[in-house]
Amino acid sequence: MERKYTVDVKPGDEEVKVAGWVHEIRDIGKLVFIVLRDREGKIQVTFKKDELNRQLFENGKNLGKEDVIQITGSVEKNDQAPGGREIKPKRMDILGKAESPLPLEVSGSVDSDLSTRLDKRFMDLRKKNVFDVFSFRDKVVTGLREFYDDEGYIEIHTPIISKGGAEGGATLFPVIYYQEEAFLRQSPQLYKQMLMAAGFDKVYEIGPSFRAEKFGTSRHVSEFTQWDVELSFIEDHNDVMDALENGLKFLIDYLKEHASRELEAMGVELKSIDEKFPRITFDEALNLLKEEFDYVPEDSGDLDTKGEKLLGKHFMEKGHDFFFVVGYPGEKFYYMQDREEDEMESRKFDLIFRGQELSSGGQREHRLDVILEAMNEEGVDKSNFSFYLEAFKFGMPPHGGFGMGLDRLVTKLLGLENIKEGILFPRDPSRLAP
C-alpha cells in the first residue's frame, strides 16, 4: 500500500498508510491519543484498549515524542481531532526511536533563541512554521523559473571555483585548487557575460555565491543564494530593469495563487503590483535624503544602510515597496559609465525593497578598449581575467544583467527578523556547522 500524506487522508477511507513523527501524546489510561506529524500536516491516531490487541495498544502507550512511526488503519470522522478525522490503527511499525530529553522543543510550547535553533537545525526544521518558510522559498524559485522560462531564458550552471572574482578585493574566499590559488565566486557575472559572446542571448542561474566579509548584522551571510540574469541586444539599462521588474511582478501574483497556504499560516498578505517601480538617479536619491530627512551618507559614492532605509520609508509611504536607484559613481570596470548622453555617472542600478538592497545590475560595458582602460584606472590585474577578456575580442553584443539575493527576497517577503531564518544551514564568520 502506498503511503499517504496526512493532508490527503479523508474520513471513510477504509485503509490508509501514513508515516511521520509523534508530535503529541495524551495518555488517559485505556485511551491513548497520538498526533502524528508529517511535512504536510497532522492527524490523530487513537489507541483504544478495548478495540486493539494487547501488543498494539502497549506499543502505542509506550511511544515517545518525535519517535518515527508508520501507521496502517481506517479513518473515521472526529470533530475534536486535528482536521476533523482520526485513524483507528490496525498496525504500527516503529521506524526510529527518539532519545529523551529532546535537544529542542518541536511542538512550539517552548521558544528557543536563533543560535540554539541553528545549532540543532535538523530539529528546528521539524517545526511547521519553520518548514513553511522553505516550502514558500521553493515556490519562489518555481515562480521565477516559470516566468523566465516563458520569456525564453536558458538556465545555466557556471563554475563556483574561479581564477578571479567579479568584485575582487578582500571579500574573496581563497581556495587551493591543486597547486594553484583560486577563489570561491562572488558572482557568476563574468561567466554570464561570456555566454552573451557565445550567443546565448538570455540566461538565468540560481546558485551559491560567497563574500568573506566580517559582519554582525541580521542582513548578511557569508554564503548566499543568488538569482542571476543576463540578456543581450539591449538598448540600455532600462531593458535590464524591465526584466527584473516584470519577473518580480509575475512572482507576486504566482505566490498569491500557489503559496496561499504558507502565506496564510504566516499571516502575510501580498498585493499585486500594477504600476511601474519608481526609478530615480543616484543624485536624486541624495537630494531626497538631504531635503526630506536631512541625511547625507558618509560615503559620497553609496547610499549606505541608513540611506536605503530612509528611502524605503519615503517610497513605502507613497505605496511603493520596490524602487530603483540608477547611476552610481565610481563603478567597477564591467559597468558602462560616463556615456556622453547620460546625465549620470554609470548605468548601474540597485533595486531596493522595503528599505533594503535586493538586487544590483545594469548595462555592462561591451567595448574591449573601454574595459581595458577602466581596468588600468582601477589597477586591476588583467592576467586574472584573461579568460574573460578574450570573449570581448570576437564580437560582443550590448548586454546587461543583474543578481538578486534570493535569501533577502524570502526574508523580506515573509517579514522574517533575520536572513538566517530563510536559509537551511546558514554560514557566517562564526558558523561553519552544521
Image (tube, grey):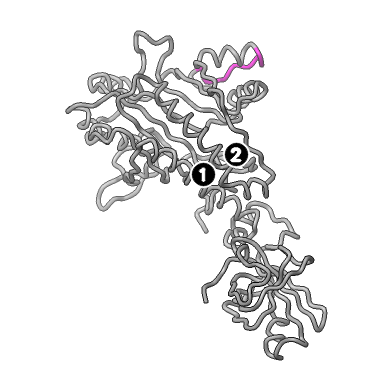
**Label 2: how many residues lie within 10 Å, few (<14), some (14-19) or many (20+)?**
some
Res 230 label: none
- Is 289 left or right of 330, judged from the image as shown? right
Query: What residue did someone put label 1 on?
Result: 140
Residue 66 percent across, percent down from the top left: 65, 71
**Which residue is at the front of the view, 102 or 23?**
23
Verify CB contact (< 8 Å) between mark 2 and mark 1: yes
Give the amino acid type for the residue marked by disc 1 in the picture. Answer: Val
Q: Quick check: 279 above or below 416?
A: above
Q: Which residues are magenta?
A: 292-300
Residue 263 percent across, percent down from the top left: 64, 45
Q: In the current view of this chain or complex, which residue is farthest to the left? A: 394
Residue 356 in view in this figure = yes
Q: Label 1's element?
A: helix
The residue drawn where x is 56% and y is 51% is 134
The residue drawn where x is 66% and y is 14% is 292
Residue 294 percent across, percent down from the top left: 65, 14
Residue 217 in view in this figure = no
**Which residue is at the front of the view, 329 or 171?**
329
Q: Quadrant of residue 31?
A: bottom right
**Which of labels 2 and 1 is toward the front?**
1
Q: Tag 1 or tag 2, which sits nearer the N-term?
A: 1
Label 2, label 1: how far apart the Cα atoms are? 10 Å
Q: Quadrant of residue 277?
A: top right
Res 413 label: 2
**Label 1: how many residues lie within 10 Å, few (<14), some (14-19) or many (20+)?**
many
The main secondary structure of the magenta stretch is loop
The residue drawn where x is 59% and y is 50% is 133
Q: Quick check: 173 above or below 115?
A: above
- Is 126 left or right of 165, judged from the image as shown? right
**Which residue is at the front of the view, 315 or 381?**
315
